[in-house]
Image (cartoon, helix red, strand yellow):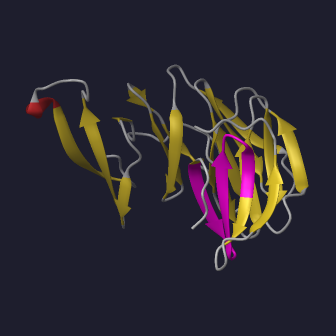
Amino acid sequence: SVPLEIARLAYDQGRVIATTSRGLQAFDAATGRLLWTRQLHTQERCPAVAADGVVYTGSIETAYALRSSDGSTLWSRQLTDVCDATVGPTLVYYTNGTATTALRRSDGTVAWRALHTTGASPTALHGGRLWHTQTHYAPVLDAATGATAPGAHSFIWRRPAFAGDLAFISVGEVNTSEPDARMLQAVDVATGA
């Protein structure tokens, strides 16, 4: 075991990436040995994600792609209030309270940017769509273009769980003692029904 103040964890290619109050730290998953540390002014509440040997994270105004083997910077892109990242096959999506920005995983160039009328936070990627979470009306976006997916909006409080073409979503008021105010809803990801 490794004594450490860890906010969030990611795993990729035998490495555990920890988002901590000290920045990012990578550990060998088999031995627990510290491999590298990077201080990027990341926020503990904003976890790093990792895929295919690359760690994606954000600081207050910069999105980063780091080599998971040594923590070196592959690319960086200035964005406003970068926090949550979601990794897709060719794009990585960063969401803040007012927008989602899709960056190309290869070089960090902007593929598209979608503005939100209400605050949106972490996303889940499934079926070619980005499912946002927030406290009110949550947009569902086409992952390739950033366009709003027709008929696929919901009041989502937590990231959905997926099974095939179904998204299971927690809906309703969470700060209430009324049991009928909170429900589990199943939504067809293709039709939004």
The location of residue 77, given as percent across then percent down, is 85, 39
Residue at far top of view: 117
The location of residue 166, given as percent across then percent down, is 32, 59
| Quarter holding residue 55 | bottom right
Q: Is residue 13 above or below residue 5?
A: below
Task: Name the side, left or right, on which 175 lies relative to 33.
Answer: left
Question: Which residue is depicted at the point 38% across and 25% down?
Answer: 136
Question: Which residue is depicted at the point 73% across and 62% down?
Answer: 26
Q: Main secondary structure of the magenta part?
A: strand
Task: Name the side, left or right, on which 168 lies relative to 147.
Answer: left
Q: Is residue 8 magenta?
A: yes
Question: Which residue is depicted at the point 9% across and 32% down?
Answer: 180
Question: Which residue is depicted at the point 81% across and 43% down?
Answer: 39
In front: 11, or 187? Answer: 11
Residue at far bottom of view: 30
The location of residue 143, given as percent across then percent down, is 59, 49
Task: Name the side, left or right, on which 36 lies relative to 84.
Answer: right
The location of residue 66, given as percent across then percent down, is 82, 56
Total marks placed: 0
Q: Is residue 116 above or below residue 132?
A: above
| Quarter holding residue 96 | top right
Instruction: Find the magenta span and give its range.
Output: 7-25
| Quarter of the picture holding the N terminus | bottom right
Q: Is residue 157 magenta?
A: no
- Residue 17 visible in the snapshot: yes
In front: 151, or 135? Answer: 135
- Residue 144 visible in the snapshot: no
